[in-house]
Image (cartoon, grey):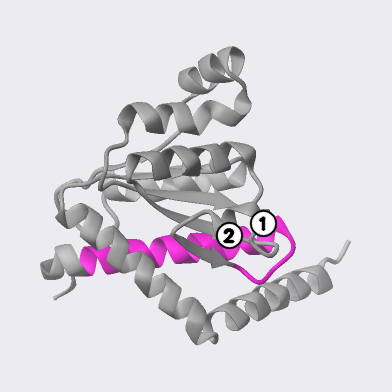
Amino acid sequence: MDFTNIWTQSFEDAYKVLAEFYQNPEQIKKCNQMSQMLIETFNNGGNVFSCGNGGSHCDAMHFAEEFTGRYRDDRRALGALALGDPSHVTCVSNDYGFEHIFSRQLDGLGRKGDMMIGLSTSGNSANVIKAVEVAKEKGIKTVGLLGKGGGKLKDMVDLAIVVPANTSDRVQEIHIKILHTVIETAERAIFPENYA
């Protein structure tokens, strides 16, 4: 079978979503605000937590390991953790319910001055919502990387970045670009020697 048309259409669709996103000055302003929040968190000795479900959980883990490992060049590790390790998830979902898997861990590990990034393509993930509620109680700054209009999380987080797409794959493609770029901005600010 020849899938040429499917491949072409897929890349065209992805390009249209990306173009609509980055050509909107308000979106870039919000992304820049996210950079400032993250840099301030690290400069003040705070940690960043990330969470999401399914592919968004994979993106949350990818984001965190870029800080505890390395992104483009060697430098000291920065405090980042994707919430939701398997033993914690099975324990908490069994004892309290799946909607508590992120909030319980954040309640135990998070401190005032930290930051949390919640990824939800719908904006309505109950476990991310619970995590945001705990973050607010603890004085943890919150960012939502969202899609499909932003859902409930749009008005709950300190900063909502909503991708203008209605399918999870297109939303997640922009989310990973946002995450990679915010990592780069943080590195450029904290480790300028890596970009000399």
Left or right for 66, reference 151: left
130 or 169, nearer to the observer:
130
Please report contact status of discs 1 and 2: CB closer than 8 Å, yes or no.
yes
Residue 147, percent from left and from top: 64, 61
Task: State the extent of the magenta-drawn residues as a range.
Answer: 163-188
Q: Position of residue 73 (x, y in %)?
A: 21, 59
Q: Nearer the viewer, residue 8 or 16?
A: 16
Question: Residue 126, relative to residue 25: is it above or below?
Answer: above
Q: Quadrant of residue 47?
A: top left
Q: Residues within 10 Å of mark 1 (few under 14, many from 20)?
A: some
Q: Quadrant of residue 162?
A: bottom right
Quarter of the image with the N terminus in it: bottom right
Q: Is residue 110 above or below residue 141?
A: above
Residue farthest to the front?
A: 137
Taking the spot 45% from the left edge, 79% from the top edge, the residue there is 28
Q: Can you give x and y, in whole percent of width and height, for residue 119 in the image?
A: 54, 51
Residue 84 shows in this picture: no
Query: Which residue bears the numbered disc 2?
Result: 154
At 64% from the left edge and 43% from the top edge, which residue is drawn? Answer: 125
> Label 1 amino acid?
Gly
Q: Which residue is disc 1 drawn over?
A: 151
